[in-house]
Image (spheres, rainbow, N blue to C red):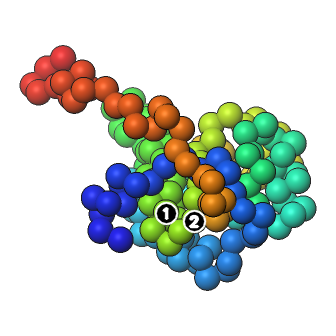
Amino acid sequence: MEFEKLISERYSVRNFKDEHLKQEHIEKILEAAHKAPTGCNYQPQRILVLNSDSSIEKLKGCTKCHFNAPAAMLICHNRDESWKRPYDGALSSPVDAAIVTTHIMLAAHNIGVGCCWVMHFNPAAMCATFNIPENYEPAALLVMGYPAPDAKPLDLHYKTRPLDEVVFYDSF
């Protein structure tokens, strides 16, 4: 899909067909995630793929915002493998995880898979439920699936602030 069209048409899908993702689609999405840039190319992202009835049932205990999606990906970052900014010790890995998540969302939409980035989840429950190592921090949850025929963006999707409210040149 042409890039301008892709970024214009992608939206947060909250209504899915009751069908798990095809493995070939998962692999295509993960290939795009693997190509995402990360700080010093340390690649601290860790992606948990949930694409079975049992894993989705477990997920429902960690978030109410699952939208009955048949699949999900939890994007974590390994704090121990993160580039660290020398001035203040800030880690690049949370940003790296966000970049990876964006690649996943765009790649998914490009092949007909819908997703919704969910921040409303319990990280401690996620770690306990899915045996996530202590040094991995859950950063983003994408609930995913093939959009239902009646899936559509929320009205808010089409509302944006004027550029002059969010972009500044030279100083704020």
Q: Residue at x 18, y 24 (%)?
A: 164
Q: Position of residue 42 (x, y in %)?
A: 45, 60
Q: Which mark is residue 113?
A: 2
Question: Where, quadrant-wise, is the C terminus in this rendering?
Answer: top left
Mark yes or no: residue 33 visible: no
Q: Are marks 2 and 1 in contact (CB under 8 Å)?
A: yes
Which amino acid type is shown beneath numbered disc 2? Answer: Val
Name above or below for residue 143 compared with residue 48. Answer: above
Mark yes or no: residue 2 visible: yes
Q: Residues within 10 Å of mark 2 (few under 14, many from 20)?
A: many
Residue lying furthest top:
172
Q: Residue at x 53, y 77 (%)?
A: 28
172 or 39: nearer the viewer: 172
Q: Which mark is residue 109?
A: 1
Q: Position of residue 158 (x, y in %)?
A: 40, 37
Name above or below for residue 56 compared with residue 112. Answer: above
83 or 131: nearer the viewer: 131
